Amino acid sequence: MTNTFPVLGIQPFSFLCPTRLVFGPGSVAQTGQILADAGITSVLVVVGSRFTKSSSGFASMLQSLSDASIAWTEYSDVHADPDDTNVRTAAIMLRKEGHQAVLAYGGGSPIDCAKSAALSAANGADILDYLYTRAQPQRPALPIFAVTSTAGTGSEMSSAAVTTDQSESRKLGFSHPSLFPQAAIVDPALHASMPPSLTAATGLDALTHVVESYLSLAANPICDAINLEAMRRIGSSLPVAWADGSNLAARANMALASASAGMAFSQTGLGMVHGFAHPLGSRLGAAHGMANAVLLPYILAAMAGHVAPRMAQIDAALHGNADPASTYSATSLVETIVSMNKAMGIPASVAELAAVLGVDKKSLAEKRMDILADALSYRSRPRSPRTFSDSELATLYDVAVDGNLERAYRI
Ligand SMILES: [Fe+2]
């Protein structure tokens, strides 16, 4: 893949996002009508935690289904980071009940589970066959609808879904055009109940999406516009939403940034922050957004000598272009992210993250080779703006473990 960023001209690209976005406070009450308009009369509702299930937003969504005479059954055993058993169970329910569609309510976990189940059920196939590219879908997924209760995953507007292979402890992503939801219902009022820790983790996931998408070798001018706009909203609103969860304007900005990021990264792919965050999730139990946030400064520092102008543009966008362009640089971006992380209580290194999760140093060292092997085979690695060798990535992981940011610049 050739790196011809816009200053040199526009490289050929395609852009697809067929998802209908229904955005705004109170939009959850439209869910039933949106499904009815699409001809859906029977749906599998996929929802995650007990907390989410007992929320007023979930009740409002179910009421809207009743009002639209839509029949449903509920699958509510989805874990954080759904595994192949979750997907299989949901797919069996879909087929057994003869539902026409899936409707996910929650964050990335139920949305991704619903997507993978919709694809598996339509094809009568096991999700692992797709994750390990042993087969390709012959039919599109059943129609997917998503209502978000967090702002970060982007799955509500993306063509990707991540599933954990339980037996191998590996998180693997799969993309397919039919995994774009038919409609995403993004009601920022539902996000107000997120505690600060979840606001930080999900918001920093959204930040990582726009940064990695903007720096991808497959970046294009439409995605650039989407990503820069989302960066501006995240830079101004994430600290506000974290400090005051009831601030609806900040919640709305984050919700919009998350959804639009999903649209962009579906075109461009992500990068090595996600490449390492997936194994840190599956092998250490790190929350996805938290793992991204810890890794982001190190991977950016290692890319500083390769995409400095683009990194400076990201920092400018995060600051709303408040100062002259010359104020911003690759280094200032890294510093901005370090200070955002620090302000929101994000661990400063992978070792600190592991300690918070109760993983001791010996255990972390024992997992090193497996984490590295997963990261090296990450599907978006070829889109990284710096072509890291295997040994450079190993060094990068080690400096992120040790918290040695200065060393990351010199890789
Ligand atoms: Fe992510």
Image: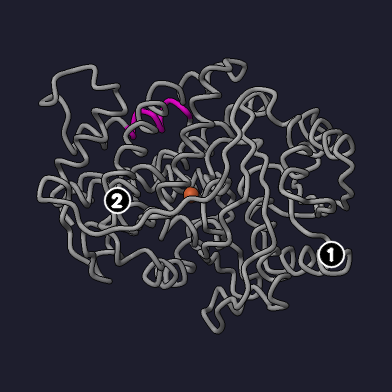
* The C terminus sits in image quarter: bottom left
Dot 1 lies on which element? helix
Q: Are marks 2 and 1 in contact (CB under 8 Å)?
A: no
Q: Which mark is residue 93?
A: 1
Q: Which residue of the protein is positioned furthest toward the bottom in this rendering?
A: 134
Q: Residues within 10 Å of mark 2 (few under 14, many from 20)?
A: many
Residue 341 among those drawn in magenta? yes
Name the one closer to the observer, 176 or 109: 176
Q: Main secondary structure of the magenta part?
A: helix
Q: Label 2 belongs to which residue?
A: 299
Where is residue 385? Give x, y as percent. Answer: 23, 56
Which tag, 2 or 1, sits closer to the chain's start?
Answer: 1
* Residue at x 23%, y 65% (from the top left corner): 388
Magenta region: 337-344
Q: The residue under label 2 is which amino acid type?
A: Ile
Left/right placement of residue 210 relative to residue 102 reads left
List x then y, in percent, for residue 289: 50, 44
Most foreground residue, 135 or 310: 135
Question: Which residue occupies 72% across, 31% down?
Answer: 28
Disc 2/disc 1 C-alpha distance (Å) = 41 Å
Note whether residue 164 is visible.
yes
Observer-nearest of 104 and 401:
104
Taking the spot 45% from the left edge, 66% from the top edge, the residue there is 371
